[in-house]
Structures are given as C-alpha cells and as structure tokens.
Image (spheres, grey):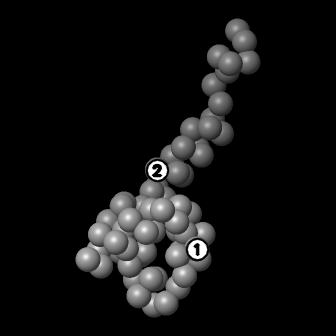
C-alpha cells in the first residue's frame, strides 16, 4: 500500500465544508449589482466576492443595459 492509497478523512471533511459554502451565480450576480449600485469599486467587489474584474464587468454590463 502506498501513501496515495491511504484514506484521508481530512480531505473528505474539507470537501464537504466547501459544498456548503457554494454561492449560486444568481446570488453572486445580485451581490455584484447591489455593491456596484452602493458605490463600491469594481476592484473592491472582485476582492470581496473572490472573482475577477472581468466577471464584474460582464455582470454589470448585462444587468444594467
């Protein structure tokens, strides 16, 4: 048995926690628009929501047209 065959419970716990914290794209898009309308900069929104400025630009362009 190699170290790669070893069952690692830590990995399972992390992946389960990540599943619970997933944000749907609709919620994320709504947050982007909300923060943008409140006056937050695109850079700050990207940092806060952990996404790219390009994604922020696309969402804003699609929602505000």
Q: Could one spot residue 32 in this view of the protein?
A: yes
Q: Residue at x 29, y 69 (%)?
A: 62
Q: Residue at x 73, y 18 (%)?
A: 3
Q: Quadrant of the N terminus?
A: top right
Q: Which mark is residue 43?
A: 1
User: Which residue lies under the disc numbered 2?
Assistant: 19
In terms of sequence position, does the residue under pointer 1 or pointer 2 come before the other? 2
Q: Residue sitting at 59 percent across and 46 percent down?
A: 14
Tell me where residue 2 sits by quadrant: top right
* Residue depicted at x 65% and y 30%: 8
Measuring from the top left, give residue 60's x and y in whole percent. 37, 74
Q: Secondary structure at mark 1?
A: helix
Residue at the extreme left: 65
Q: Which mark is residue 14?
A: none
Q: Quadrant of the image for the C terminus? A: bottom left
SS at badge 2: helix
């Amino acid at each position: 048995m190699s170290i790669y065959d070893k069952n690692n419970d830590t990995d399972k716990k992390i992946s389960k926690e990540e599943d619970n914290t997933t944000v749907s794209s609709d919620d994320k898009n709504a947050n982007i628009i909300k923060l943008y309308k409140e006056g937050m900069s695109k850079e700050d929104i990207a940092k806060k929501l952990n996404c790219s400025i390009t994604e922020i630009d696309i969402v804003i362009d699609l929602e505000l047209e």
